[in-house]
Amino acid sequence: MTTTTAPTATVRALRFAAKERVAVVDAPLPEPGPGELILDVKAAGLCGSDLHYFHMTHEEMRQATQPRSPEMTPGHEIAGVVKAVGPGVSHPEVGDRVAVQHYSGCGQCESCRRGWDVHCERGARVYSLNRPGGCQDELVVTAKDCVVLPDEVSFPVGAFLACGATTAYQALLRSEVRPGETVVVIGVGPVGLAVLAWAKAFGLRAVGTDPSPERRAFAESLGYSGIHDSAGFDIDAVVPGGASAVIDTSGNVHGRRTALEVVKTWGTVVFVGLGPDFAVDPVPDLIMRQVTLRGMFVFSVPLMMEAVAEAGRLGVDLAPIITSVSSIEEGPDAFADFAAGSVGKSVIGWE
């Protein structure tokens, strides 16, 4: 007697075919297991970390500080509609609109029980690194990683909230800036722009700096008036005495040094952007001025839920930051444009 195995379903997906080349391929879509679901992907944001791997060979990806398999679909900023659920899944439900927290931990260790899957003590699985990401038609995700989106939050904005926009929200919280105080944002790429959007919604005064004329012009086109060239930025001319809080989203040495120079006595600096080594001199930079320096990486699931709810409740104006929504067939060109230095946020979309 001959038996046959049902063929595995396939979906269209983007893959890093070679250094600086993206291709559309057919990728397998397994059945969801216990605690998993199938997501009908509606939006997948392109992030700076995706660009980091775009410039690598396959071997360089495998040897990177955060290794990734070339067989993994990129895109860790994911939003969509629940299409089907596996055994044991009661939440979210079929038809729910969700965004996906991209670090998926064991769910059992102390960090995971607090919602901080990013610090899973058993090693988190990361969408787009060691499990497929969102740049494909459908995707198997772990149900506990999903955050339900309110109707007023679009899928592209939901994908943005799955990484950059919630990172920006947490950065403001960690800065402890209060109404009437000024926050300086170093770098007005997508994350920096999201900080400005949250600051506006919270009624804060925000000042931005960036070396790129195109990025500065784009920020100003969104209605943010206090945008300055980072070269020769004079804090005393803008905020005499310095800023109560400074958030560096750039990750570069100049940006970090500027952050420590423009913060006022008793102020707080938050380092968000990833970048090269940077030396802090504790005595003049921190101790003598009572400055608090905080590092920040990703966010907890509860904090993402809070950010999603607040974005809907406050009507945070994140949508204008998204300048490009491309189909999956246009994905190779979208990555090339992103690598060429496009401003704003780029998204692969299905609507």
Image: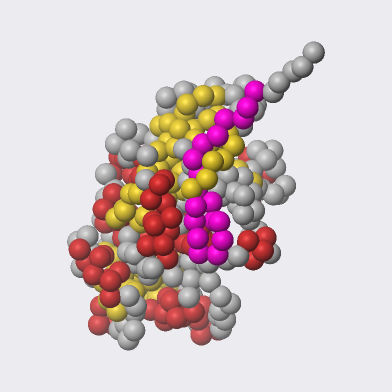
Extent of the magenta region: 6-23
Q: x%, y% of residue 73?
A: 55, 48
Observer-nearest residue: 123 or 4?
4
Examine the residues drawn in magenta and state their main secondary structure. strand
Location of residue 86 with respect to 17 vertically, above or below: above
Judge from the rendering whether residue 210 lies leftward or rightward of residue 279; answer left or right. Answer: left
Towards the viewer: 45 or 208? 45
Q: Where is residue 6 in the image (x, y as percent from the top left)?
A: 65, 23
- Residue at image position (44%, 70%) is 250
Position of the C terminus by quadrant: top left
Q: Left or right of 346: which side holds 288?
A: right
Tell me the residue at 38%/71% (across/down): 186
User: Is 10 within the magenta?
Assistant: yes
- Tell me the residue at 48%/66% (across/down): 273
Whether the magenta-drawn stretch holds residue 271 is answered as no
Name the residue at the right extreme: 1
The chosen color scheme is secondary structure
- The answer to whether any part of residue 304 appears in the image is no
Identify the residue at the far top of this view. 1
Q: Which of the 4 image quadrants contains residue 153? A: top left
Residue 233 visible in the picture? yes
Image quarter of residue 191: bottom left
Picture coordinates of residue 35, whole percent (x, y): 62, 28
Q: Which of the 4 quarters of the picture holds residue 188?
A: bottom left
